[in-house]
Image (spheres, helix red, strand yellow):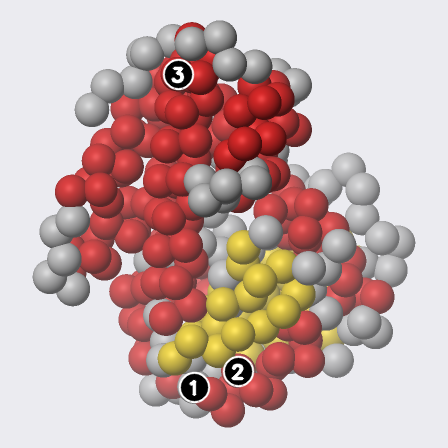
């Protein structure tokens, strides 16, 4: 079976090789060829090269781009099973699912959590939405890149990804603020982490990000601030659509957007600490 993998950025380039290792023939496509790919992974500079693949995976910046790519492939006669592993809006996923279903083409949304490190180790959490039987058929393929959990109808995967990243962002901001205050009071960052990570305040930021990316001042986690801001905006949108109007969601969204406006589109999300520590991000 040949799989087309569209989107070989930091995440895609780390994920696609696991499909090769699992025994699939893989044709990868992106605007720019990544510097390092397995020799067995065929790189195609044109989208048409993946039109005859049995499965097509998209790992792209947003749902609008995914929708455009899939529609283009369909005009080329592509009848693949589509898997969108990007961070897209669930409304886009549902729209794609319904449009493709009308032409007897399958589509599932299967975004991931775990970052580049877990992508390299094939340890991603994969959140799947769509027809249960389609997800079950595609699970062996997805499992080569991580652990799959089925969440419900089309769009549920992307809804869960946005909600997860909202909770992650809230923890990030709270942790950065607490660290900045602790340092102002003369508490050593190492002692701060020691206490937090053995107490109820521990979270992904305190356990995995502060020491590695903030205290080292590398700020190179590989996850862009603009992508976190996008995901939280999606979470805010679906929360409002459900009738929820919690103040925390809105505050986190505004906090990220203000930081992004200051730091720029190329900023890593851990660079937000620089603004927090200097009291430069307001709500």
- Quadrant (top left/top right/bottom left/bottom right) for the C terminus: top left
Q: Nearer the viewer, mark 3 or mark 2?
A: 3
228 sits to left or right of 50: left
In percent of width and height, residue 143 lies at 68, 73
Name the residue nearer the viewer: 29 or 57.
57
**Mark 1–mark 2 CB contact (< 8 Å):** yes
Q: How many marks?
A: 3
Whichever of callouts 1 and 3 sits on the residue coming sooner in the sequence is: 1
* As drawn, 100 above or below 217: below
* As drawn, 174 above or below 147: above
In percent of width and height, residue 189 lies at 56, 19
In percent of width and height, residue 258 lies at 28, 24
Q: Any mark on residue 131, and which? A: 1
Name the residue nearer the viewer: 236 or 77.
236
Name the residue carrying label 2: 135
Whichever of callouts 3 and 2 sits on the residue coming sooner in the sequence is: 2
* As drawn, 234 above or below 24: above
Name the residue at 69% across, 64% down. 145
Which element type, helix, strand or loop, lies under badge 1?
A: loop
Q: Residue placed farthest to the right in the image?
A: 39
Name the residue nearer the viewer: 28 or 108.
108
Alpha carbon separation for disc pair 3 and 2: 46 Å
Name the residue at 29% across, 52% down. 235
* As drawn, 121 above or below 155: above
Which element type, helix, strand or loop, lies under badge 3?
A: helix
Q: Any mark on residue 181, and which? A: 3
Alpha carbon separation for disc pair 1 and 3: 48 Å
Alpha carbon separation for disc pair 1 and 2: 6 Å
Name the residue at 48% across, 72% down. 128
**Mark 3–mark 2 CB contact (< 8 Å):** no
Which element type, helix, strand or loop, lies under badge 2?
A: helix
Viewer can see residue 52:
no
């Amino acid at each position: 079976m040949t799989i087309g993998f569209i989107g070989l950025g930091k995440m895609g380039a780390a994920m696609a090789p696991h499909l090769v290792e699992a025994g699939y023939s893989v044709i990868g496509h992106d605007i720019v060829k990544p510097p390092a790919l397995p020799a067995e992974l065929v790189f195609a500079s044109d989208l048409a090269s993946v039109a005859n693949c049995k499965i097509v995976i998209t790992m792209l910046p947003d749902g609008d781009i995914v929708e455009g790519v899939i529609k283009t492939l369909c005009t080329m006669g592509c009848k693949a099973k589509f898997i969108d592993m990007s961070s897209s809006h669930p409304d886009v996923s549902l729209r794609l699912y319904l449009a493709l279903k009308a032409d007897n083409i399958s589509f599932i949304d299967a975004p991931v959590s775990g970052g580049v490190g877990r992508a390299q180790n094939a340890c991603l959490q994969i959140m799947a939405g769509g027809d249960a039987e389609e997800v079950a058929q595609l699970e062996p393929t997805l499992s080569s890149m991580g652990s799959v959990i089925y969440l419900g109808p089309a769009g549920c995967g992307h809804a869960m990804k946005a909600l997860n990243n909202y909770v992650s962002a809230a923890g990030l901001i709270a942790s950065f603020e607490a660290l900045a205050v602790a340092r102002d009071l003369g508490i050593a960052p190492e002692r701060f982490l020691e206490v937090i990570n053995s107490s109820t305040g521990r979270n992904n930021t305190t356990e995995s990000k502060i020491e590695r990316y903030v205290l080292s001042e590398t700020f190179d986690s590989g996850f862009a601030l603009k992508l976190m801001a996008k995901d939280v905006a999606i979470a805010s949108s679906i929360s409002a659509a459900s009738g929820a109007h919690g103040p925390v969601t809105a505050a986190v969204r505004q906090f990220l957007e203000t930081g992004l406006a200051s730091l720029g589109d190329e900023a890593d999300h851990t660079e937000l600490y620089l603004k927090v520590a200097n009291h430069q991000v307001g709500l």
